[in-house]
Image (cartoon, rainbow, N blue to C red):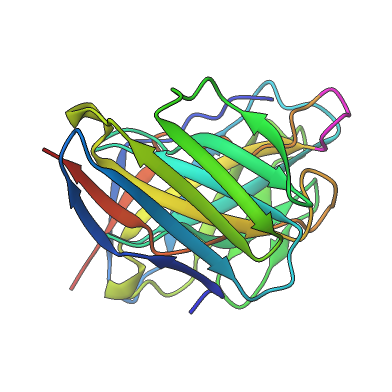
Amino acid sequence: ETGVTQTPRHLVMGMTNKKSLKCEQHLGHNAMYWYKQSAKKPLELMFVYSLEERVENNSVPSRFSPECPNSSHLFLHLHTLQPEDSALYLCASSQDFGGGLDEKLFFGSGTQLSVL
Amino acid sequence: DAKTTQPPSMDCAEGRAANLPCNHSTISGNEYVYWYRQIHSQGPQYIIHGLKNNETNEMASLIITEDRKSSTLILPHATLRDTAVYYCIVRGFHGSGNTGKLIFGQGTTLQVKP
């Protein structure tokens, strides 16, 4: 148990659906992240939020829309996805963003997304 | 941020030490070496990090060469549960000429065998 919980664990959706991924951290951290891991590829950083403000957006298509209503919760809203968006989506948190010697990322178990 | 090079895969016998190498020849003075691992179907897990001194914790030891151009992660007594992908990452502080972000490469797939 890492203190970062992601739901759902598995999601199958059609290209016209709208769905949301949820992440919750119980660690009192100030920064939260979305990573994407496609099959046989390295993790790709998608978004970073620090103190509920988006500080990184790595050229992610607009069909992915993040939301951070407070420092404990992070959402990824999905709409009109493509089959190539099928991947493991991982949420992580850290005490702060890029600021500390001992900054470590704590990851959730991920949501395995399949787009049909 | 400096790049790292790791072998794509390694095997290790259960109970023996696993030594995972990493090259980071372009590392700069204010960049740290971090190690994470990812067990199948789970998120990555932090293992250890260091700047220039050797480090040890309950999970592993990190040996960094004097010139800091390479490092080795040592799992002293590997078990079957240590089978995972191990990532070596170089990271500096955000705003110090670095992004401060953890950028994952392909890592080394360690297979621990009975």
* A63 vs B63: above or below: above
Q: Most prominent secondary structure in the magenta stretch?
A: loop
Residue located at (23% from left, 60% from top): A10
Q: Position of residue A31 (x, y in %)?
A: 71, 53
* A107 vs A99: above or below: below
Is residue B96 located in the magenta-colored stretch of the structure? yes
Is residue A70 located in the magenta-colored stretch of the structure? no
Q: Is residue A55 left or right of residue B11?
A: right
Q: Is residue A47 left or right of residue B92?
A: left
Viewer-nearest residue: B108 or B16: B108
Counting the numbered discs, the total is: 0
Viewer-nearest residue: A63 or B81: A63
Q: Position of residue A110 (x, y in %)?
A: 38, 58
Q: Quadrant of the N terminus of chain B?
A: top right
Viewer-nearest residue: A71 or B84: A71
Residue located at (55% from left, 67% from top): A24
Q: Quadrant of residue B91?
A: top right
Q: Quadrant of residue A17?
A: top left
* B34 vs B69: above or below: below
Residue located at (58% from left, 37% from top): A47
Q: Is residue B59 left or right of residue B54?
A: left
Can residue A105 be seen at all in this image of the molecule? no
**Farthest residue toward the right?**
B96
Residue located at (79% from left, 46% from top): B51
Q: Position of residue A105 (x, y in %)?
A: 62, 57
The range drawn in magenta is B93-97
Q: Position of residue B67 (x, y in %)?
A: 76, 32
Can residue A11 be seen at all in this image of the molecule? yes
Q: Is residue A100 left or right of residue A107?
A: right
